[in-house]
Image (spheres, rainbow, N blue to C red):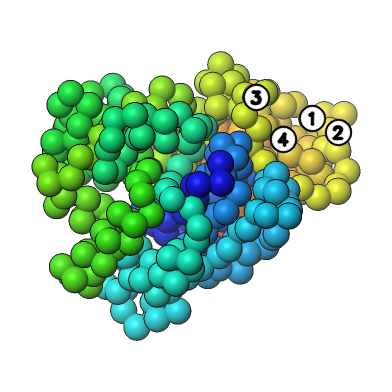
Amino acid sequence: MSNILGIVSPENDTVIVEGLMDYRPIPAISFLGRYRLIDFAISNFSNSHIDHIKVFVKNQPRSLIEQLGSGRHYGINSKRGRLQILYNDLSGISALYNTDINTYLRNMEFIEEADEKYVAITPGYQICAVDYRDVVKQHEEEGADVTVLYKQTDRAKERFIGCPALTLDNGYVTESVTNLGKRKNAAISMETYVMAKDMFVKLVREAHAESSAYSLRDILRDKIGKLRIMGYSYKGYFACINSMNSYYKTSMELLDYETAKDLFRPDWPIYTKTNDSVPAFYGEEAKVEHSVIANGCRIEGTVINSALGRGVIVEKGAIVKDAILLPFSHIGKDCRVEYAVVDKWAKVNRVKEVKGTSSYDVAYIRRRDKI
């Protein structure tokens, strides 16, 4: 779809994935043993035939650059496609100025010089499978100024905390408030928008004129009733990774095959960077149930209801249950890890039990730590 510019927006200050975000930008966080969070946003663009993509990142771009590369592994057209990473190089002055609006402004020339008529803007930390061709079709047919995707849910009390909750009348947004978990049912904004590129540029400049601390979310809220902001009801699987709790719960939820097949569809591949590695090895005493195990793992203990990234080692007598082990982490002999997230290259050996209290309070082992 050559008339659409894809934009992956930087996360706002309400997105805090404790621990994991200390070492990489949130879109670069490992997910479900195989992926990075940003893979879903880029794959949605690619599957929708959008191959001109700008990825905006707040800081620490190294791991994101390594993951995205040239974009070829996402199926982006190698002749006319383009994937570009942009960031705000003045963000270190103060967190107050490290907003999406200021990041867009610092890179406005790259947006304005794009030939595409429309922009599709989406965060890099949401899990979904969106076909933008359907969204653009509705946007054009209804003559909307802005189209915002939303997910109707009956789990707003325990999920999507901190996300905007919309009120709609005859398909148009009449109110946007922050979901504080007070209502069970809500139309949760996916903070994914389609609009004309000229409209986007205008909104960015107006937001900056209003306040140096304004975000795109802020200016769109101010424009309710002044612009035709239409909702697009998204029916598929949706999760927002804006906290450690949501990261853990979403990972555990997608271990269920019936849930996962709503997201991972044969006609809608989720692309990621791959590498050559040996298959997972299972020892004679290994026991694995209801888990995702990536290539290169060595399993000689017990793994139950868990997600293991590439190259993870679980030694004899070790028990991993209800846990997420990021690539190359190591669980030593007779150790027990439960309700926990273990970061890359961390090793649990001397401490024989690492256990969170529940799915609401998971333990976290830092990257490269030895405990």
CA separation, marks 3 and 2?
35 Å
Q: Give the x, y percent position of residue 363.
A: 48, 48
Element marked by disc 2 = loop
Element marked by disc 3 = loop
Q: Are marks 1 and 2 in contact (CB under 8 Å)?
A: yes
Which one is nearer the viewer's eye here, 315 or 68? 68
Residue found at x 16% / y 50%:
223
Q: Are marks 3 and 2 in contact (CB under 8 Å)?
A: no
Q: Which residue is mark 2?
A: 283
Residue 293 bears which disc, if any? 4
Front disc: 4 or 2: 4
Q: Label 2 amino acid?
A: Gly
Of callouts 1 and 3, which one flags the residue occurring earlier in the amino acid sequence? 3
CA separation, marks 4 and 3?
23 Å
CA separation, marks 1 and 3?
34 Å
Of callouts 4 and 3, which one flags the residue occurring earlier in the amino acid sequence? 3
Which one is nearer the viewer's eye here, 312 or 137? 137
Q: Which residue is mark 3?
A: 267
Element marked by disc 4 = strand
